[in-house]
């Protein structure tokens, strides 16, 4: 099992650091899957987390100048590690002005992801800083737990309002209630509601727009054209919703009343955590709601996609 | 005692950096200058700023009479609270110690004839003087404070301890992790080349581990006044001393070091070769391992009035109390015998 990557471009390093920092704000630990083409940060919903799941995918070619890996075996050419993204984020933040940053899988006192960088100095010799971030190797038999989540058979898909605005609203609502209802319809309307014995507050968003049917695939295709990497195969796209052919024609059924709201009641802190973590405005931000089941948030940046699933509570 | 000076920000900055060490400020007007000192509660960090008489436009000390006092450092900080506005408005600073009334008066002469007078009460105190001889230490370095600031910034602000290792051409700084925490802890290490320093003289390839927290006060001070920092260290167990000097001011920060660093032995292949640990093994109890010998004779008896550098090298207090007491008693006895003189070399 080997992994060695090198980042030399300062913008790539900066972007990479920001992605990891965003992930670190969403979860304390997660799984990092290294494949020949991608890095994936995965949090698979467990009861302990209140069932939140996260899937963050980066195309390695957009960040790394050099990238070599050898997975567990030739059939399973992948490395699966449990990491604490905050440590990675901290380490990367200290080397933003480096000439080059190497990330390697090493065995020190335990398996580590080592981040090594040469920092510029006035003298003839560079300063070398190394950060050894301990990781746990995840055995192959557990890999099935970290597969890409399938797209839920959503009832409504809507573009999100500006994340900053949403965050402001949710921050204030958090003071009043622990649970928030997110609802949206196919007419581009979304409401965020809280209701307690004393007070109920609703914030209405209009004219948000709904992603076209077969939403996600279409959008990712848009982005593929924008990004410099032109060799993405269809296998690189997130899977279409499973389910029967009727819904394959376009997630929500054609006959759904455009005014009808699909809603889900979620733990407000989970939503707040998601909104707090975002550092950069995404190119596309949307939300799929499965009525009373799950809220599926999707953020697409130029070279990173982030999906976050918040289960509904009764 | 009376001191008057044209107000210089370095006075306030020194006080602020002492506040990072301990809660109390020890003030001792000496013939060779005004000494301001502080020590932390576990006695593992000590700092002293000596302002020479030339720093002041007038410096009067009652002859042949030693006087020391201590007060809450927060009260003194309150006098020099806002550095930026002080610089703009204060022209002169008048410090007066009134022994009869147990009062220390700071009078700030500000623009437009404004006088701000602060009366602080103090307590008598024992002498506070760390015993160390930095000139006898094997390893000496000097650098621009920026180098150390850039080093420290690589570590998380909460980091407690660092280990510094040297060989003839390199210095490694890494975070120190207790054995129990090793499996999960992130390890950070920086390697600095000798030519990044203004002065880099190594006689023994050593590693010392000390607390980073108290050092940060000195780094902020040195960077803001633009003075180079000199670092002296010796065997593990001997304190590490960091100094800043200019013609009228000398600041010394003395930090205790772990007397036995298990990391040294484990990482020998990566690091400079380190000498075997000293015969007494202080590993088991970290608090003890961190203590440095403090000279604590009861005031107002005769004290070593000479500058600290001429005193004996420091040693750690051991788990074997007899040995420790023997050492500390030794210093005190010597003092009683030689009134106001120096200890044995």
Image: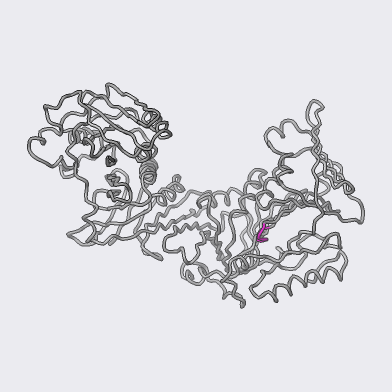
Q: Nearer the viewer, residue A213 or A45?
A: A45
Image quadrant for the N terminus of chain A?
Answer: bottom left
Q: Is residue A113 above or below residue A190?
A: below
Residue A5 magenta: no
Q: Residue furthest left?
A: A245
Residue stretch rendered in magenta on the structure: B41-45
Q: Position of residue A234 (x, y in %)?
A: 15, 42
Rendering quarter of residue A275 = top left
Q: Position of residue A70 (x, y in %)?
A: 25, 59
Whether residue B71 appears in this view of the structure is: yes
Would you say B78 lies left or right of A181 here? right
Residue shown at the point (60%, 69%) measured from the top left = B259
**Main SS class of the magenta portion in the image:** loop
Whether residue A39 appears in this view of the structure is: no
Q: Nearer the viewer, residue B250 or B93?
A: B93
Which coloring applies here?
Answer: one colour
Rendering quarter of residue A211 = top left
Residue shown at the point (24%, 24%) measured from the top left = A188
């Amino acid at each position: 099992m080997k992994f060695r990557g090198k980042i030399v471009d300062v913008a790539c390093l900066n972007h990479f650091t920001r992605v990891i920092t965003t992930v670190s704000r969403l979860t304390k630990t997660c799984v990092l899957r290294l494949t020949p083409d991608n890095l994936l940060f995965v949090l698979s919903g467990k009861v302990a987390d209140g069932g939140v799941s996260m899937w963050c995918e980066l195309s390695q070619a957009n960040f790394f100048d050099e990238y070599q890996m050898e997975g567990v075996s030739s059939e399973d050419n992948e490395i699966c590690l449990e990491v604490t993204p905050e440590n990675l984020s901290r380490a990367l933040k200290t080397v933003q002005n480096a000439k080059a940053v190497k990330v390697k899988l090493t065995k020190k006192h335990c398996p580590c992801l080592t981040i090594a960088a040469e920092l510029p100095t006035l003298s003839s010799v560079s300063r070398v800083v190394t950060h050894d971030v301990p990781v746990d190797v995840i055995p192959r038999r557990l890999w099935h737990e970290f597969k890409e989540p399938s797209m839920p058979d959503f009832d409504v898909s809507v573009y999100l309002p500006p994340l900053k605005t949403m965050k402001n609203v949710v921050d204030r609502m958090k003071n009043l209630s622990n649970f928030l209802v997110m609802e949206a319809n196919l007419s581009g309307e979304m409401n965020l509601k809280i209701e307690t014995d004393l007070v109920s507050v609703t914030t209405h968003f209009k004219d948000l727009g709904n992603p076209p049917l077969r939403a996600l695939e279409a959008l990712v295709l848009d982005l593929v054209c924008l990004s410099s990497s032109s060799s993405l195969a269809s296998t690189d796209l997130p899977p279409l919703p499973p389910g029967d052919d009727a819904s394959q024609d376009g997630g929500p059924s054609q006959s759904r009343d455009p005014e009808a709201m699909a809603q889900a009641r979620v733990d407000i802190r989970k939503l707040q955590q998601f909104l707090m973590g975002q550092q950069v405005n995404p190119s596309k931000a949307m939300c799929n709601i499965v009525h009373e089941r799950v809220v599926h948030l999707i953020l697409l940046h130029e070279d990173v996609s982030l999906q976050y699933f918040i289960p509904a509570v009764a | 005692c009376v001191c008057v000076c044209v107000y210089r920000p370095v006075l306030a900055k020194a006080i602020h950096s002492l506040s990072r060490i301990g809660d109390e400020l020890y003030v001792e007007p000496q013939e060779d200058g005004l000494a301001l000192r502080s020590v932390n509660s576990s006695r593992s960090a000590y700092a002293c700023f000596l302002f020479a008489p030339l720093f002041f436009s007038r410096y009067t000390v009652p002859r042949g009479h030693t006087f020391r006092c201590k007060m809450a450092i927060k009260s003194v900080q309150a006098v020099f609270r806002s550095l930026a506005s002080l610089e703009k408005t204060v022209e002169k600073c008048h410090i007066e110690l009134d022994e009869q009334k147990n009062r220390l008066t700071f009078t700030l002469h500000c623009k437009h004839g404004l006088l701000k007078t602060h009366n602080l009460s103090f307590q008598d105190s024992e002498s506070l003087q760390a015993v160390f001889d930095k000139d006898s230490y094997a390893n000496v370095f000097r650098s621009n404070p920026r180098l150390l600031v850039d080093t420290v910034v690589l570590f998380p602000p909460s980091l407690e301890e660092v280990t510094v290792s040297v060989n003839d051409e390199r210095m490694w700084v890494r975070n120190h992790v207790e054995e129990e925490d090793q499996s999960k802890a992130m390890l950070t290490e920086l390697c600095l080349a000798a030519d990044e320093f203004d002065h880099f003289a190594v006689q023994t390839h050593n590693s010392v581990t000390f607390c980073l927290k108290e050092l940060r006060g000195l780094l902020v001070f040195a960077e803001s006044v633009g003075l180079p920092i000199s670092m002296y260290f010796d065997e593990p167990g001997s304190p590490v001393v960091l100094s800043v000097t200019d013609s009228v001011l000398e600041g010394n920060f003395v930090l205790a070091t772990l007397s036995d660093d298990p990391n040294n032995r484990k990482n020998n292949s990566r690091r400079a070769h380190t000498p075997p640990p000293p015969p007494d093994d202080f590993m088991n109890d970290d608090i003890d391992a961190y203590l440095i010998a403090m000279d604590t004779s009861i005031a107002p008896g005769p004290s070593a009035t000479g500058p600290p550098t001429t005193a004996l090298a420091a040693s750690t207090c051991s788990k074997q109390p007899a040995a420790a007491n023997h050492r500390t008693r030794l210093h005190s006895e010597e003092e009683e015998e030689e009134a106001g003189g120096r200890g044995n070399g």
